[in-house]
Amino acid sequence: MNSKYSFDSKIAYLNVGGEFMDTFESTLRSGGGFLDALFSGRHEPTLDKEGRIFLDRDGATFRKVLDFLRSAEKPVVTDVPLLKELQHLGIVPENLFPEAKLVVGQNTIVPHGSRGR
């Protein structure tokens, strides 16, 4: 893969809607979608004046996205703003845990073996 941009660190320093967050690039890439593409090195990220990668998203909701991506055992997600943000970012359950499914009518991500709420 040809990468035009490279990152000096395995840690991503983010400014999400004015909130600073640090996490591993691998955490951000684990869900696929936009974040995986952003950190693939094929795209130039927008940086703030501190050199952090700027994402024009709601910081509180994005923090929930990070918590979701960091979870080893993916929880049942019923938080509608979180579901919408995951969808917006292209993070789909199949990328994270193939046996899961999105129950569209119920706005819920249900891991395999769970009954949901």
Image (cartoon, helix red, strand yellow):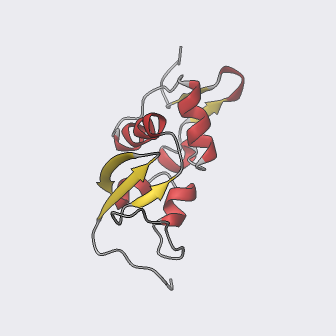
Nearer the observer, 103 or 77: 77
- Could you say where residue 100 lies in the image, as x and y percent from the top left? 54, 36
Residue 39 lies in what quarter of the image?
bottom left
In front of the other: 80 or 98? 80
Outermost residue on the right side: it is 105
Return the x and y of residue 45 as percentages of the image width and height. 49, 68
Q: Position of residue 117 (x, y in %)?
A: 53, 13
The quadrant in which residue 12 appears is bottom left
Q: Is 45 located above or below residue 68 in the figure?
A: below
Q: What residue is drawn where x is 53% and y is 24%?
A: 79
Q: Nearer the viewer, residue 22 or 90?
A: 22
Q: How many marks?
A: 0
Q: Is residue 106 above or below residue 46?
A: above
In the displayed image of the protein, which residue is found farthest to the top? Answer: 117
Rendered position, 101 above or below 40: above
Residue 34: tell me if it is visible.
yes
Kindly identify the residue that appears in the image at 34 percent across and 43 percent down.
Answer: 70
- Is residue 29 visible in the rendered image? The answer is no
Which x, y percent locates residue 18? 42, 46
Towards the viewer: 24 or 94: 24
- State the residue lying farthest toward the front: 49
- Residue occupying the point 49% across, 51% down: 31
Q: Identify whether 31 is placed above or below 111.
A: below
